[in-house]
Amino acid sequence: MAQCNYLGCERSEALPFKCKYCGKSFCTKHRLPENHACEKLHLSKSPISIESSTKIATKEQLDFQVPKTRQDKRFTTYDFDDDSQYFSKGSDGNIYSVKSTEKQTQRRAFFSQVGDSFTTGKEFLDILIASLIVMLSFGFTAIVMSHVGWVFSGFILAIILVSYLSTIIPRKLLAKRFGCTSRFMLTKLGLLISALTIISPIKYLSPGMLVIPELDYIAKKRSGIISAVGSMINIALGTVFIILGILLPDFSIAILMLTGAFITSQITLLRLIPMRFLPGKRILNWSWPLFTIMLVLTLAIFILSILFGVMGQPIITI
C-alpha cells in the first residue's frame, strides 16, 4: 500500500497513480496534475498540437501553410477566438478546456432542442433540400415583386440557386485547401423558419449550415478568409447585375438583372450578420475594415436595386 503524496491526503492505494510530470504517486482523487497542484504542470502539452516538442508555432508560420499529410491536419492555433465557449489559451501558449457556466449550459440545452443539426445521410441531398427550400421561399416573392412575369421564373430561380450555393461550395473548397474538414448539415429551426417565410416578404434563408470544426482552432486569418469567400463572390455577382441593370436598354432584361442584384444582396446580408454561428462574426473578428467594406457594398447593391426598378417601376431614371 502506498500513501498519496498530496499534502493533507491520508488515503493509501494498492495501485497508486504515478504522475508523468512530477513523478510522485497519488490516489484516485488526486491522480490528475491539476488535482494535486503539480509543480511541473507547465510541461504538459495540449492534445491539439502539431509538434510534441516545446517549439510553439507562430501565427505567421501557420498562415497559408497547407498540410500535406493526414497527420498535419491536427492544428494548433495560438490565435483563436478569445470568446470561445469551450477552450482558452494559457500564458504558456497551450490550449485548455473551459468548464461551461450554468447560463451557457442552459442556453445550449434550449438551442439543442429546437436547433439541432441533422442529416439525411448524404451531403449532396442535404444541400439539395436546403437549396429547394431557399428557391421556393425566395422565388415566389421575387417573381411577384419584380413584375417580370412567370416566363422568367427559371432565370430568377437559377440566380437564387447560384447565389445560395456560392455561400457553401467555395467555403468547402477553401476549407479543404487549408486542410479542414467540412460538412453541410440541415437544421430543424432553420428549415422551419425558412418554410414559414415562403409567404412572407421578410425572409430567413438559412435552412442549413456548413460545419467546419477546425475554424475554432486555425488562425483567424484563415478562418476569416474561409468565411468571407462566399460573400465576396455574391458581392461580385451583385455588382455585375447592378451595372447590367442600369446600362441595358431593354427594360425587361434590366429588371431581371436588378432582381439578381436584389437577391444576391439579401442572401449576403444574412450571412454578414455578426452572430456567433454566422460567417460575419469570423470576418469581423479577423478584419473589421474588410467586414465594413463588404457590408457597405452589400447595402449599396441592395438599395440601388430598389432605386433603379426591381419593384417594377424605377425610382431613379437615367
Image (tube, rainbow, N blue to C red):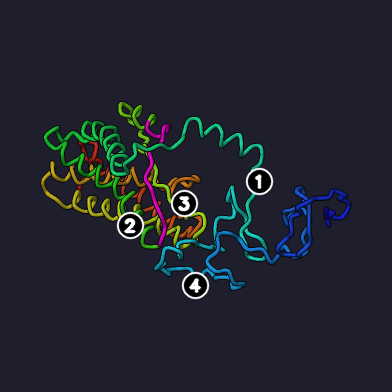
Q: How far apart are marks 2 and 1 (CA)?
A: 34 Å
Considering depth in this image, is 199 or 187 the residue closer to the camera?
187
Tag 4, which secondary structure?
Answer: helix
Q: Residue at x 73, y 57 (%)?
A: 33
* Residue at image point 11% right, 35% down: 151
Boundaries of the magenta span? 179-191
| Residue labelled with disc 3 | 213
Residue 188: x, y in percent?
41, 32
Sequence-first tag of 3 and 1: 1
- Disc 2 and disc 4 in contact, CB within 8 angstroms: no
Closer to the N terminus: mark 2 or mark 3? 2
Q: Name the residue under label 2.
A: 173
Q: Badge 3: few (under 14), some or many (20 or more) residues near its Cα, within 10 Å?
A: few
Question: Do the residues bearing badges 3 and 1 touch, measured as CB atoms within 8 Å?
Answer: no
Mark 1 neighbour density, 10 Å: few (under 14) some (14–19) many (20 or more)? few
Q: Distance between the residues labelled 3 and 1?
A: 19 Å
Looking at the picture, which amino acid does disc 3 mark? Pro
Of mark 3 and mark 4, the one earlier in the sequence is 4
Judged from the image, the secondary structure of the residue bearing numbered disc 1 is loop
Residue matched to label 1: 99
Between discs 2 and 4, the one toward the N terminus: 4
